[in-house]
Image (spheres, rainbow, N blue to C red):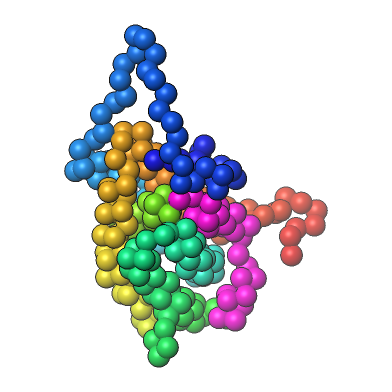
Amino acid sequence: MNRPESVTGAAGADETRGRAAPMAPAAAGTSAPAAPWPRDEFEARLRALGARYHIHHPYHRMMHEGRCTKDQIRGWVINRYYYQVCIPIKDANVLANCPDPAVRREWVQRIIDHDGAPGETGGIEAWLALADACGLDRERVAALTDVLPGVRFAVDAYVNFARRASWQEAACSSLTELFAPEIHQQRLTGWPDHYPWIDDAGLTYFRKRLSEARRDVEHGLAITLDHFTTRADQEHALSILQFKLDVLWSMLDAMWMAYVADMPPYHSCAEPRP
């Protein structure tokens, strides 16, 4: 399987995509390549990366334990919206790079889930309803006026990865959905008690994603297990999933600096960023 030089450094990926790299002969006295992990062990190793999911970030722990202020919840909603609106763009990149009509027919549902369809609202509108429920100005949220630079960089890195990588690699990067149902359920269970000032109607997004994420992960996991079949490819898949975990963690790092540590971008400059 063709792989970019690194997970994030895909500037030249288009030059080699679709061409298998020649096998170099083993040097005398060297051991043969490691055998691939059995399918169930490979899946277990992917799932084990859930130990680094952003559910464990201090910001999320604060939210789960009811310790966030209104401004901290609102800051998270504002910045996470940028991720929400970029997800269907990421998924459109998967479609653009995928030559298999059967895969495209199934993957396109992810875009519909976020963008909506005639007579049916999607996840982006549901997130704006959450913004309404938190007392935010939805037009300002939709305009992305207050998105932190660190969040933009992290999300843009994810979208650009999906644009430049193979469609199977981009599908693999979506596997943080393996761990998502737990975090959605935590919000549905805990937020009404911890944050009663948030209208319950604003939690619709999390209710929708409970079933959507489980459906999506079955597809993405099957693609990954079927495609990454050598040990080198399996290890590469783990690095891709780790990259996505880095994206999610970095987003929360930026929010922690701005809303918990009270050190937003340029806070130490004579002329702070407007």
Q: Is residue 182 visible?
A: no
- Residue found at x 75% / y 58%: 272
First to last magenta residue range:
138-166
Residue 134 in the magenta stretch? The answer is no
* Horizontal relation, residue 56 to residue 157: left or right: left
Rendered location of residue 207, percent (x, y): 31, 74
- Give the main secondary structure of the magenta stretch: helix
Q: Is residue 64 above or below residue 124?
A: above
* Horizontal relation, residue 211 to residue 240: left or right: left
- Front residue of 44/270: it is 44
Quarter of the image that includes the N terminus: top left
Q: Residue furthest top?
A: 29
- Residue found at x 27% / y 66%: 215
Residue 165 in the magenta stretch? The answer is yes
- Residue found at x 20% / y 38%: 38
Q: Residue furthest bottom?
A: 119
Can you tell which quarter of the image residue 219 is in? bottom left
Quarter of the image that includes the C terminus: bottom right
Q: Is residue 183 above or below residue 130?
A: above
Q: Is residue 92 above or below residue 54?
A: below
- Residue found at x 51% / y 70%: 85
Rendered location of residue 43, percent (x, y): 24, 45
Q: Is residue 29 above or below residue 118?
A: above
Q: Is residue 117 visible?
A: yes
